[in-house]
């Protein structure tokens, strides 16, 4: 396993981190984690050299932290650095951050977490964090030994990112970055700014919720095929990130043991700098994807549950496939099935809760309306 320095800490972090938000499930309910398989995957990753695990309060409807706690039994806790996150949007009078941290430590069955991040900061949530004196809470929790280091994950614009970086002596930050989304949210400029300030930078969404590798469009595959050495889409995506100065670790939300094995193999390969020809290939792929994309959804699930039972990430995903992959027939088939299950966009009441919850700032209600209209016009 390749390792690298973790910001200003005297800690060598594995180049590959395990993002614990996409465990295998027994049924469509996110809480129905296949416990035996997920524990097997986590422990295989740790045995293969992964030493950074990332979870959060809402992942798998609260069950991710519970599963991670079970997986870290039998000596595995001592082998890793453990990160989880404060659901700042849930903090309110009478239920301050202390309540959530206590619950998380109990779920994880630990006395302390190594890294505690304020989750999904944007302008509104940053103001809320200040209102509820979250920075003072972080200081207190560190003094009490409940968390070792503080950080934040981020979903907004670069100027706010820089403001937050400068507001507190953070140890780490977590940002959305991949070879397509180079200037999205904090982007490459944010990476450089945080690294220059001595923060460890943890990268999320390296595969854009799996969209960069699940079904590569033929014209984009043709660009990859121009390279002298053939690589898988996962290899291309991770290699681009690992070649960026300032990236500490890259989180992969692995869902199968096969994905774990593939990523472990890639993270063990010698890191060879990109050639000018390879840089040109990445640039061309980025351009083509940006021309195709309609919906900037990563499938994080923060918009769920919907009061009207609309399966928002699924609707957005299959609708985007029309533009990304030309999958109109598949959209019609899958959307029709969602109608049968009463999970489709026609049920949307446009209450706006999903707009407030979306860390990617997707105009969710507009896209849901578009998807429903597309179905009605094309189902015949």
Image: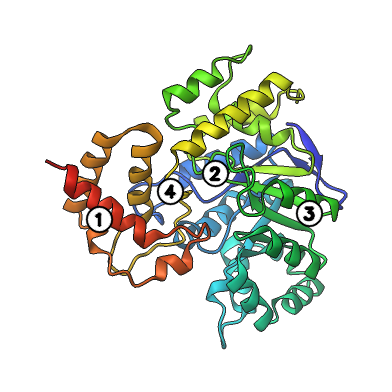
Residue 257 drawn above or below residue 356:
above
Q: Which mark is residue 344?
A: 1
- Marks 2 & 1, CB-CB < 8 Å contact: no
Q: Which mark is residue 194?
A: 3
Q: Is residue 75 among the parts visible in the rendering? A: no
The mark lying in front, picked from 4 and 3, is: 4
The mark lying in front, picked from 4 and 2, is: 4
Q: Residue at x 58, y 49 (%)?
A: 71
The earlier-in-sequence mark between 4 and 1 is: 4
Label 3 residue SS: helix
Q: Position of residue 282 (x, y in %)?
A: 62, 28
Label 4 residue SS: loop
Kindly indicate the quadrant of the structure image that contains residue 51. top right
Q: CA distance from mark 3 to mark 1?
A: 41 Å
Q: Residue at x 63, y 59 (%)?
A: 157
Label 1 residue SS: loop
Q: Position of residue 210 (x, y in %)?
A: 49, 39
Q: Residue at x 55, y 64 (%)?
A: 57
Q: Residue at x 62, y 73 (%)?
A: 102
Q: Position of residue 158 (x, y in %)?
A: 68, 58
Kindly indicate the quadrant of the structure image that contains residue 122. bottom right
Q: CA distance from mark 4 to mark 2?
A: 20 Å
Q: Counting other residues with Cα less than 10 Å from the Cα at mark 4, is it few (<14), some (14-19), or many (20 or more)?
A: some
Kindly indicate the quadrant of the structure image that contains residue 199. bottom right
Q: CA distance from mark 3 to mark 2?
A: 23 Å
Q: Which mark is residue 295?
A: 4
Q: Which residue is mark 2?
A: 253
């Amino acid at each position: 396993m390749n390792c690298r320095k973790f910001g200003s800490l005297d800690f060598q972090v594995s180049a590959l981190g395990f993002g614990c938000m996409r465990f295998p499930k027994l049924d469509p309910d996110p809480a129905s984690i296949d416990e035996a398989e997920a524990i097997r995957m986590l422990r295989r990753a740790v045995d293969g050299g992964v030493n950074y695990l990332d979870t959060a309060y809402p992942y798998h409807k609260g069950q991710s932290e519970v599963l991670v706690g079970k997986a870290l039994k039998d000596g595995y806790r001592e082998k890793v650095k453990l990160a989880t996150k404060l659901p700042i949007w849930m903090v309110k009078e009478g239920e301050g951050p202390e309540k959530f941290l206590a619950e998380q430590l109990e779920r994880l069955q630990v006395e302390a977490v190594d890294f505690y991040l304020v989750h999904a900061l944007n302008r509104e949530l940053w103001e809320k964090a200040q209102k509820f004196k979250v920075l003072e809470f972080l200081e207190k929790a560190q003094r009490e030994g409940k968390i070792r280091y503080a950080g934040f994950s981020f979903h907004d614009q670069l100027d706010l990112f820089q403001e937050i970086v400068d507001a507190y002596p953070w140890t780490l930050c977590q940002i959305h970055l991949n070879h397509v989304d180079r200037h999205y949210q904090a982007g490459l400029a944010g990476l450089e700014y945080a690294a220059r300030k001595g923060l460890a930078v943890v990268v999320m969404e390296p595969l854009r919720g799996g969209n960069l590798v699940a079904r590569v469009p033929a014209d984009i595959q043709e660009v990859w095929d121009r390279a002298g050495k053939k690589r898988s889409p996962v290899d291309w995506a991770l290699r681009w990130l690992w070649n960026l100065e300032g990236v500490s670790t890259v989180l992969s939300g692995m869902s199968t043991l096969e994905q774990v094995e593939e990523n472990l193999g890639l993270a063990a390969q010698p890191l060879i700098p990109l050639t000018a020809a390879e840089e040109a290939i990445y640039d061309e792929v980025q351009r083509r994807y940006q021309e195709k994309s309609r919906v900037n959804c990563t499938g994080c699930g923060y918009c769920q549950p919907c009061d009207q039972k609309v399966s928002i990430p699924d609707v957005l995903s299959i609708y985007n496939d029309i533009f990304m992959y030309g999958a109109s027939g598949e959209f019609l088939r899958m959307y029709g099935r969602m109608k049968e299950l009463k999970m489709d966009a026609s049920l949307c009441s446009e209450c706006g809760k999903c707009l407030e919850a979306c860390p990617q700032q997707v105009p969710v209600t507009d896209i849901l309306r578009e998807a429903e209209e597309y179905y009605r016009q094309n189902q015949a």
